[in-house]
Amino acid sequence: MSLILLLKILEYTSAIIATIKYKKFASKFTTYFLIYLWIICLTETLSPQVSKYGFSVNGLYTIYTFFEFNLLFLMYLSITKVEFYKKLIKLFITITNLVFFFEVYKYGLTMWASNTSVVGSILLSIILILYLKEFLYSDKILNYSKSLYFWITLGSLVYYLGSIPFQAIINYLENRDLYFLQISLAIFAQSCVIIGFLWSKKETK
C-alpha cells in the first residue's frame, strides 16, 4: 500500500469516526474540527476530477487553505481561557487572511497560496504551543492521554510545524523526498485524530 493511499484512507476514516463520535464531544471546537476534516475529504475527492477536466488544482487548494487556517484558529479561540491568547488568535486570523487575499489578488488562483500556508503554519504553531503550555498547567494534564484536545493539538503541531519548509517551496518543488516527509507528517496527524476520538473521554469545562 502506498503512503498516499494510506493517507487518503486515514483522512476518510478520521472524518467518519469524528462524525460518529461528534455527539459525545459536541462543542464549538469539535464542530469546527469536523468541518475541517470533511473539507479535507471534499478537496481530495474533487482534486482528481479537477485535473481530469484539464483545470489546475492550485485554485482548489488555495480555497482549501482559506478554510483550513480560519477553522483551526477558531477551534483554539473557542477553548483557550487565557485572554491574551484569545487576542493573539484574533490578530493571527487577521494577518493570515490579509496575506491570503493579497496573494489571491496578486496571483489569482493559478498558484497554490504557499505564502498563506507558511504564515498560517507558523502562526498556528505558535498558538498550538501556547495551548499546550496552558494545557500543561491545567488539571487536564493529569489525564492527558484521554483528552481529545491533546491528541488533536499534538498531531496538528507536528504536522504544521514540520510542514513549514515544504510549504515555503511547494510551487517550485522538484525533490520528491519532501513529498514523502509531508505525507508522513499528515499520516501521523490523522492517526492522532483517530486515537483521540476513539480513546478520549468527554472534555470537562
Image (cartoon, rainbow, N blue to C red):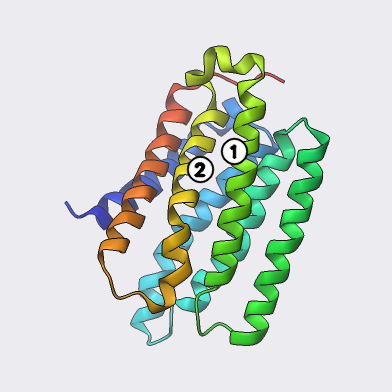
**Residue located beneath label 2 in the image:** 157
Task: For label 1, count other residues whose C-alpha is less than 10 Å away and answer few (under 14), some (14-19) or many (20+).
Answer: some
Residue located 52% across and 78% down the image: 59
Find residue 119 and report its image quarter: bottom right
Residue located 68% across and 33% down the image: 27
Percent position of residue 109, x then y: 56, 82
Percent position of residue 105, x then y: 67, 84
Q: CA distance from mark 1 to mark 2?
A: 8 Å
Percent position of residue 87, x then y: 81, 45
First of labels 1, 2 by sequence position:
1
Pick the front one: 147 or 121? 121
Q: Is 198 placed above or below 73 here?
A: above
Task: For label 2, count other residues whose C-alpha is less than 10 Å away and answer few (under 14), some (14-19) or many (20+).
Answer: many
Pick the front one: 147 or 31? 147
Q: Amino acid at mark 2?
A: Leu
Q: Is 107 placed above or below 63 here?
A: below
| 25 with respect to 194 (left or right) | right
For the residue labelled by badge 1, is the local secondary structure a helix, a strand or a loop?
Answer: helix
Question: Is residue 203 visible to the viewer in this orientation of the structure?
Answer: no
Q: Is 102 placed above or below 155 here?
A: below
Q: Which mark is residue 129?
A: 1
Question: Is residue 89 visible to the viewer in this orientation of the structure?
Answer: yes
Percent position of residue 185, x then y: 37, 48
Q: Quadrant of the C terminus?
A: top right
Residue located 37% across and 38% down the image: 191
| 184 with respect to 2 (left or right) | right
Pick the front one: 29 or 178? 178
Residue located 58% across and 44% down the image: 33
Labels 1 and 2 touching (C-beta < 8 A): yes
